[in-house]
Image (cartoon, rainbow, N blue to C red):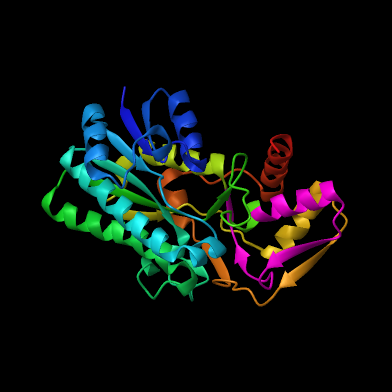
Amino acid sequence: MKKIIVTGGTGFLGKNVIKLLESNKFKVFSVSRKEGIDITNYDLFRKHVLKIRPDIMIHCAAHVGGIAYNKLHPVEVFEDNSIISMNVVKVCNEAGIPILINIMPNCTYPGNMEIYEESKWWDGEMHPSVLTYGLPRKMLWGHCFAYCQINPNFRPVHLIFPNMYGPGDHFEIIKSHALGALISKIVDAKNKGKKHVEIWGTGKPVREWLYVEDGAMAILKTIENIEKFEPNEIMNVGVTKGISIIDMAKLIKEIVGWEGEFVLQAEKPDGAMKKILSAKKMKKKLNWAPKTKLKEGIRKTVDWYQNNL
C-alpha cells in the first residue's frame, strides 16, 4: 500500500483529495497547521515527514485568498507561500520522496493571456493583482528544477488548476473567490430580504471553475498515469469553458431564488479579464476530463451552504 502525504489536508481541496485516495486504498497522512504541523517551521515539518517516509507528496497547502485578500495582506501572502514552497521541495529531497504532485494556480500564467497553454507558461509577466501569490508558487517550479539537476530520482509534476468551488468552500467575503463570495452574498440577501447585492469590479472578467471533486479526481488520475510525465512537467487541469462574473451571479441568483438587483462596484480592480486553461495535454495524458457541469456544481454548493449556515 502506497503512503501519501497531503499538505493542507484540512483545507478545501485537501479534504477531498484525502477522501478520494483513502477510498482507493492508499494510506494517507494529512499535514496542516490545524493538526499541529506548520510547514513554515522546517525542522518540525521535516521531523514529521521523516517519520512517515511516504512514496508520494501531494502539495495542496497555500496561504490564499481572493483579490481583496491579496491586496490587504501582500507581505504575508508572499512570505508564507515562499517559505512553504521551499520547505516542501527541500523536504521531499531530504526524505527521499520520489514523487511530488504540486497544485499550481492558473494565476502563474502571463496576465495578458486569455487561453492558457502549457508551452506559453513563461511567455510574459503575471497580472499585478496576483503577483504576491503567484510568484512564490512559480518559484516552487524553479526550486524543483534545481533539485532535478542533482537528484535523478526526483520526479515532480505540477498541475495547474483554475479556481475551485464546491461544498465546504471558503465563503468569507474577504477571503473567498468570486463564486463563494457571491453565493454568500446572494443567500444572505434572500434570507434578509435585501434588494441589492454588490459585485466587485465590472462583472466582465471571465473565469473557469473546477468542481472540487473533479480536482481531486485529476490528482488521482495523475498518480495512476505518473509514468507518462517527464520530471518537473506542468499540466493544466482545465474545464475549457468560462463564464463572466455577472453571468455567474445571475446563475446563482436563479438557483437561490433571489429577486433583487446587482450593483457593480466598477471602481474595484477586475484582475485579468479572461482566464481559460487549455486541456489538450490533460485529455491526452489522462484520457479524462472534469465531469461536473457548472450549474449542477453551483446547485450542490448552494445546498451545502444553506444547510451549514
Image point 45% across, 32% down: which residue?
A: 18
Q: Nearer the viewer, residue 253 or 64?
A: 64
Residue 253: x %, y % from top left: 79, 54
Quarter placement of the N terminus:
top left
Residue at x 72%, y 43% (from the top left corner): 302
Can residue 108 be seen? no
Q: Magenta part of the protein: which range? A: 181-210
Q: Is residue 259 left or right of residue 220?
A: right
Q: Residue at x 71, y 59 (%)?
A: 248
**Left/right of residue 147 with respect to residue 123 in the rendered view:** left
Q: Quadrant of the C terminus?
A: top right
Q: In the current view of this chain or complex, which residue is farthest to the left?
A: 150
Classify 123 as above or below 98: below
Is residue 16 a member of the stretch shown in magenta?
A: no
| Residue 203 in sight in this render | yes
Percent from the top left, x then y, of residue 214? 54, 42
Q: In the rendering, at what x and y percent does residue 286 appear?
A: 43, 44
Closer-to-camera residue (308/1): 308
